[in-house]
Image (tube, rainbow, N blue to C red):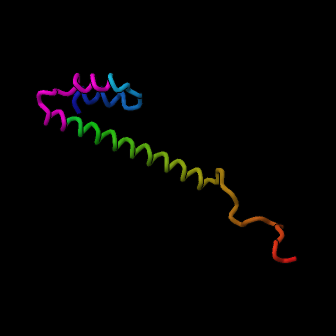
C-alpha cells in the first residue's frame, strides 16, 4: 500500500465530508493516470471491504460466545405451572 493509500486508510473510521473526500482523491490519486489511480483506489476499497467483513465477523463471534455463556438467554423448557386454555 502506498503512503497515499495508507493516509486515506487511516481515516476509514471518520466521517469525511464529500467536498473534503473529493479534494483528498485528487491529492492522493493522479487524474492524469486514470488506470493507475483506478487500480490504487480499487485496492484501497478492497482493503476497506476486507476490514468491514473482519469487523462483522469479530462482532458475530462475540455475540455467539455471549449466547454460549448464557448471557441474555431464556430457558428453553417453557413456562412451569401454566394453565391450559383448552382444559376447563
Residue 65 lies left or right of residue 16; in this view the side is right
Quarter of the figure with residue 78: bottom right
Could you tell me which quadrant the N terminus lies in? top left
The picture places residue 63, in percent across and down from the top left corner, at 54, 49
Mark count: 0
Give whichever of 84, 73 is nearer the camera: 84
Residue 47 lies left or right of residue 77; in this view the side is left
Residue 57 lies left or right of residue 63; in this view the side is left
Give the residue at x 37% y 41%.
51
Give whichever of 81, 20 is nearer the camera: 20
45 w.r.t. 76: above or below:
above
Give the residue at x 66% y 55%.
73
Magenta stretch, residue numbers: 20-39
Give whichever of 40, 86 is nearer the camera: 86
The picture places residue 47, in percent across and down from the top left corner, at 30, 40
The picture places residue 54, in percent across and down from the top left corner, at 40, 45
In this view, which residue lies farthest toward the right? Answer: 88
Quarter of the figure with residue 67: bottom right
Give whichever of 68, 31 is nearer the camera: 31
Predominant SS of the magenta segment: helix
Residue 76 lies left or right of residue 61; in this view the side is right
Give the residue at x 72% y 66%.
77
Give the residue at x 37% y 25%.
17
In this view, which residue lies farthest toward the left? Answer: 32
Q: Is residue 56 magenta?
A: no
In this view, which residue lies farthest toward the front? Answer: 19
Could you tell me which quadrant the C terminus lies in? bottom right
Q: Is residue 29 magenta?
A: yes
28 w.r.t. 66: above or below:
above
Amino acid at each position: 500500500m502506498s503512503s497515499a493509500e495508507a493516509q486515506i486508510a487511516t481515516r476509514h473510521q471518520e466521517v469525511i465530508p464529500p467536498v473534503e473526500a473529493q479534494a483528498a482523491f485528487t491529492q492522493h490519486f493522479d487524474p492524469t493516470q486514470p488506470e493507475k489511480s483506478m487500480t490504487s483506489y480499487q485496492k484501497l476499497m478492497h482493503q476497506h471491504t476486507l476490514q468491514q467483513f473482519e469487523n462483522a465477523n469479530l462482532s458475530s463471534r462475540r455475540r455467539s460466545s455471549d449466547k454460549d455463556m448464557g448471557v441474555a438467554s431464556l430457558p428453553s423448557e417453557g413456562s412451569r405451572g401454566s394453565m391450559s386454555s383448552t382444559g376447563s
